[in-house]
Image (spheres, rainbow, N blue to C red):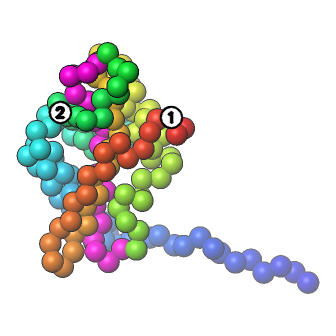
Amino acid sequence: MPLLKVNIHRENKLTLEQRREALELGRLGEQMATKYLDDNGYTILERNYRKGHLEIDIIALDPHSEFNAPYSDKKGMGDLVIIEVKTRSYDTLLQPENAVDHKKRLNLIRLGNQYVRSHGRKENVRLDVIAIVKGENGVELKHIKNAFNVMQF
């Protein structure tokens, strides 16, 4: 008896209008994240830093980081923070921070390393996620410091 072929891959085709709305929501999220970071004493070094097809949403300096490694000779320098911003509307099932998958993490690490080398940065490097959910009753912003660790890879 022949086997039935079943397509288990979900069609993920967005209309042009849905793509525009998603891009606008993403831009709004990055603007909100930038304002939040600025209001909390961060210095924004780069927005939408790109090399080839890779991108880092925000690169910032956190001058009062509590995440400086205790064994580091870089105490007092603050942290160079690579930040991925994920924005979702309230009606999605997946929390924004869960959308930073393994491949995206590896790409952030690769591009972050390239940025550090090419700009001669000496600070400790931290990888954060800012998750934003836009709902009917406003916006919720969650800053996840040290969201993942290079040592995980």
Three-letter code, disc 2: His
**Res. 3 mark:** none
Q: Position of residue 146 (x, y in %)?
A: 35, 42
Res. 103 visible in picture: yes
Left or right: 125 as drawn, with respect to 103: left
Front in this rendered view, residue 69 or 35: 69
Tell me the mark number nearer the camera, choosing from 1 and 2.
Answer: 2
- Residue under pointer 1: 151
Image quarter of the C terminus: top right
Front in this rendered view, residue 8 or 34: 34
Q: Position of residue 72 (x, y in %)?
A: 35, 20
- Residue under pointer 2: 64
| Residue drawn at 34 percent across, 25 percent down | 70
Which image quadrant for residue 149?
A: top left
Q: Secondary structure at mark 1?
A: helix
Q: Residues within 10 Å of mark 2 (few under 14, many from 20)?
A: some
Q: Residue furthest left?
A: 39
| Residue drawn at 26 percent across, 52 percent down | 143
Is 152 placed above or below 133 here? above
Count all numbered tags in the image, as a single digit: 2
| Residue drawn at 70 percent across, 78 percent down | 6
Q: Earlier in the sequence, mark 1 or mark 2?
A: 2
Image quarter of the N terminus: bottom right
Magenta region, residue range: 74-92
- CA gap between label 1 and label 2 equals 23 Å
